[in-house]
Image (tube, helix red, strand yellow):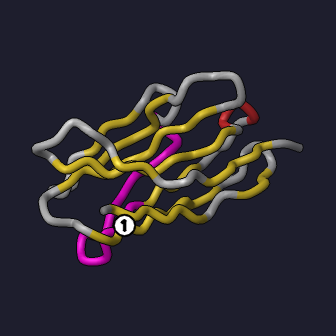
C-alpha cells in the first residue's frame, strides 16, 4: 500500500507564492511518476504537473510558466513551487503517484490552496 502525505497549502494573496510538498511511503516497489492535480469546488479534478523518476516534466496549461515541479528521489518526495498565484488557482491540490507499469494512480488526501486578497 502506498501512502502520500501533502503539505504546504494555505492562504495567500494574488501574486504570492506557495510550495507544496508530497512525501510517499509504503510499498514503493517499482519506478514511479509523481505529480499534482487540482480540484476547485463544483469542478472536475484537473492536471497540474507531473515528473518522472528521470526528471522529465509535464505541465497543464494553467501551470505553464508559473509553477515548477521537482522531486527528490532519495526522499520519495515531490514539490510544486507555485508563483504568481491567481484567485482561479484556488482549489484542493492532490498529489499522485503512478508506478510506470500501471495505469492506476495512488492519491493523497489533498491540501487546500486559497488565493484571495
Residue 78 image position (x, y, % from top left): 38, 61
Q: Quadrant of the C terminus?
A: top right
Magenta range = 64-78
Is residue 76 shown in magenta?
yes
Residue with the most extreme right position: 117
Relative side of 23 to 82, left or right: left
Image quadrant holding the N terminus, namely bottom left
Indicate left or right for 31 with 97 as reference: left
Task: Decide: is 102 above or below 76.
Answer: above
Residue 6 in magenta stretch: no
Residue at 35% from the left image edge and 49% from the top image edge: 106
Residue 74, by quadrant, is bottom left
Relative image position of residue 13 (x, y in whole percent): 81, 49
Query: Residue 60: horizontal and vertical position, in percent?
Result: 42, 30
At 66% from the left and 31% from the top, the residue drawn is: 40
What residue sits right under mark 1 in the picture?
A: 24
Say which quarter of the image contains residue 9.
Answer: bottom right
Identify the residue at image location x=21%, y=47%. Answer: 56
- Determine crowd level at label 1: few under 14, some 14-19, many 20+ residues with C-alpha closer than 10 A: many
Seen from the viewer's position, the closer of residues 13 and 22 is 22
Amino acid at each position: 500500500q502506498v501512502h502520500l502525505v501533502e503539505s504546504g497549502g494555505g492562504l495567500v494573496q494574488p501574486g504570492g507564492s506557495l510550495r507544496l510538498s508530497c512525501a510517499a511511503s509504503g510499498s514503493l516497489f517499482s519506478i514511479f511518476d509523481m505529480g499534482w492535480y487540482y480540484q476547485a469546488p463544483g469542478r472536475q479534478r484537473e492536471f497540474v504537473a507531473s515528473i518522472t523518476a528521470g526528471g522529465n516534466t509535464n505541465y497543464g496549461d494553467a501551470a505553464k510558466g508559473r509553477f515548477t515541479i521537482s522531486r527528490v528521489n532519495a526522499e520519495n518526495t515531490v514539490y510544486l513551487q507555485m508563483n504568481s498565484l491567481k484567485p482561479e488557482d484556488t482549489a484542493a491540490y492532490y498529489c499522485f503517484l503512478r508506478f510506470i507499469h500501471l495505469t492506476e494512480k495512488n492519491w493523497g488526501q489533498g491540501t487546500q490552496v486559497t488565493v484571495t486578497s
